Amino acid sequence: MEERQCRKQLRLNGYDYAQPGAYFVTVCTKNRERILGTVGADDHIGPYVKLSEVGQVVDRYTRTVPGMDRYVIMPDHVHMILRISAPNVLEGPVWSSAPVEAQVGKTIKTWKTLITKELQCSVWQRSYYDHIIRCEQDYCETVRYIEENPAKWYYNHKN
C-alpha cells in the first residue's frame, strides 16, 4: 500500500481571506536555509539583522507590498503584518486595486514571484503560515513578537 504524506491544512476553513483585516504571515526559506542574513548585536542598538544580498532583494519587494504594516526579515524566514483594506494585485510594474479571491494568498504569491524573478530561482518553501489578527491585544502582541524576534534569535543561537 502506498503511503501518502498528508499536508496540514494551513488556512482557516470557511474564512474569506479577501475580507478586510490584519493578518500575521510567516514565510520560510526552502529547507530553512539561512540565506536572508545574519543576526548580530551592537552595544548601542542591541540585536539586529544584517541582510545578505538575497535579504536586501526581499526587503526591497517587501517595502512595496500594499498594506504592509510591520515586518522583520530573519535569516531563514520573514514575519509580516498585512492590513487588507481593499484588494491589491500586481498589474504591470505597480500594485493596483482589483477584486481578487483569497487576497492574502494572492499578495503573498505575487511577492514571492517578484522576488523569484529577480533572483532567478525560488528561495521559498511552499505555502506560508498565517494568523488572523482578531483584536487590538492580538495586534499588539504580534507587533511585539516581530520587534523582539532578532533579540530572541540572537540569544537562542549565541554560542
Image: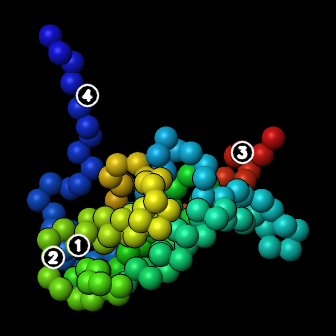
Farthest-out residue, left: 14
Judge depth for marks 1 and 3 and give the one in front: 1
Q: Position of residue 30 (x, y in %)?
A: 47, 46
Rounded to the nearest angstrom, the CA distance separating label 1 from label 4 is 28 Å
Mark 4 element type = loop
23 lies above or below 159:
below
Residue 5 tag number: 4
Which label's residue is closer to the chain start, 4 or 3?
4
Mark 1 element type = helix
Residue 103 tag number: 1
Q: What residue lies at 35% left-to-right and 87% top-to-bottom?
A: 94
Which label's residue is closer to the chain start, 3 or 2?
2
Q: Position of residue 99 (x, y in %)?
A: 14, 82
Which label's residue is closer to the chain start, 1 or 4?
4
Judge depth for marks 4 and 3 and give the one in front: 4
Q: Are marks 1 and 2 in contact (CB under 8 Å)?
A: yes
Rounded to the nearest angstrom, the CA distance separating label 1 from label 2 is 6 Å
Q: Residues within 10 Å of mark 3 (few under 14, many from 20)?
A: few
Residue 100 tag number: 2
Q: Nearer the viewer, residue 121 or 81?
A: 121
Q: Position of residue 51 (x, y in %)?
A: 66, 65
